[in-house]
Amino acid sequence: MATPDATMKLLTSDVPVSDNVALHARKVSFDLSDLPLHYVPHDAFATHVLNVLNLLLPAGEEWFVETFKEALPLIQDEKLREDVIGFMGQEAMHAHAHSGIRHLLRRKGIDTAPFLDQAHWIFESVLGERPVSGLRQRNYLVEKLAIIAALEHVFAFLGDWVLNADGLDRAGVHPTILDLLRWHGAEEVEHRMVAHETLHYFDSSYFRRARAQLIAGPVLIFLFWRGTRFLMNADPELVAMPENEKRIFWRNFVKATKRGVLPSMPHLITRMAQYFAPKYSPGNVGDTAQAVAYLASSPAAKAAEQ
């Protein structure tokens, strides 16, 4: 739990200079063939919360890439263009890497289509293409970029959390899924400035940035709640569990946070509040050096290089 001094620092830190990192997609491969259904030992709930993350990321990040493709021709700043291209490459690789979880769940007897259909409906119908042109088209693009910047803040602080979550190691989380989560988390920290700087390039309005988080945050919470309940009910290894226990979300969440396998509520609230600071910068979230060091030592990344 963050101390009061640490919380105040998070909320009031000055905007730092953007990290000068050349972003590029890294080829990785994760063999999930021997992954047990409950890869967080003795904790189906925490496993399925992480599964929701793994299921949502491909749907969301494919939409991220399509939105940035639309924005790229309008960006004249060469450094930002390079960062956006690197960001798009990394996001596309993330979507591919996490798709293995859906195949794993299917092999274990869980059809994720009903839940994923809801997620795709949000990204394709609510936030998809609209028959608009001119200034309305540009404004809609900026609205989508604001949603992405808001979500990227969440992914950045979750990436920072997973890189430092020794509770996952103590709990004996399967090493392959742990590497997948930390590899992705490290790249989220590495490219955390891009979505924010892209939004700022088109619109530096505090109101638009804050409003986007007020929309995106609750929707993300709902999807995690809905997805976790869906997976708990569909889990063939939990058929003997009473239905009322499967529906308990917050009690199981608190238990998992005490074990250190999920981020605590105070941590989530503090990090989310950070986004609403007028001088907010993603540079205050995570440590680029730590992220790059993990990416250099990731078992999957090293195996791909060989």
Image (cartoon, rainbow, N blue to C red):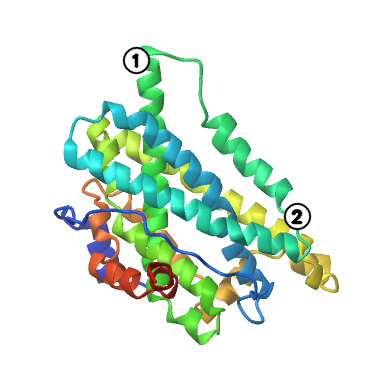
Q: Residue at x 24, y 45 (%)?
A: 278
Image quarter of the N terminus: bottom left
Q: Of the residues under marks 2 and 1, which one precedes in the sequence?
A: 2
Q: Residue at x 25, y 50 (%)?
A: 280
Residue 98, relative to residue 74: is it above or below? Answer: below
Residue 270, relative to residue 168: is it above or below? Answer: above
Residue 76's tag is none
Question: Who is closer to the viewer here, 5 or 28?
Answer: 28
Q: Residue at x 45, y 48 (%)?
A: 92
Name the residue type under label 2: Asp
Q: Is residue 303 left or right of residue 109?
A: left
Q: Residue at x 75, y 66 (%)?
A: 108
Q: SS class of the residue under badge 2?
A: loop
Residue 190, relative to residue 65: is it above or below? Answer: below
Q: Are marks 2 and 1 in contact (CB under 8 Å)?
A: no
Q: Residue furthest front?
A: 306
Front tag of 2 and 1:
2
Name the residue type under label 1: Leu
Image quarter of the C terminus: bottom left
* Quadrant in the rendering for residue 155: bottom left
How many angstroms separate mark 2 from mark 1 (CA)? Answer: 42 Å
Residue 111's tag is 2
The residue wearing badge 1 is 135
Residue 159 in picture, x, y percent from top left:
40, 63
